[in-house]
Image (spheres, rainbow, N blue to C red):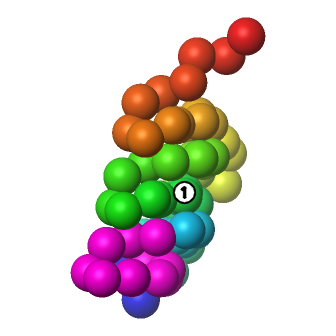
Amino acid sequence: MKATGIFENNLMQGEWIFYRETGQLWQVGNFKDSIKHGHFIRYDRNDKVEYDENFVEGKKVKAK
């Protein structure tokens, strides 16, 4: 399995979980109408966080 999540009207919605070919967790992110919307976190092959960002309608929200 490469990814799990919900499709509504052929668009990615809500939380999606992505895996590497090995089955290892790669990233978790949220979508609204197939656009990044919410928290995204990506892990390297050693399970360390390599990317941790928030998005609003596809645009990265800058940390305060």
Amino acid under label 1? Gly
Q: Which residue is mark 1?
A: 29
Q: Is residue 48 left or right of residue 60?
A: right
Which quadrant would the N terminus be assigned to in this image? bottom left
How far from the left and from the top, in percent, is residue 37?
A: 50, 48
Per the picture, the main secondary structure of the magenta-coloured stretch is strand
The residue furthest bottom is 1
Give the magenta range.
Answer: 3-13
Q: Secondary structure at mark 1?
A: strand
Residue at 67% over, 16% down: 63
Residue drawn at 56 percent across, 24 percent down: 61
Residue 58 lies, with reference to residue 44, above or below; the image says above
Quarter of the image holding residue 22? bottom left
Quadrant containing the C terminus is top right
* Residue 7 highlighted magenta (yes or no): yes
Per the image, is 10 magenta? yes
Place residue 52 in its image quadrant: top right
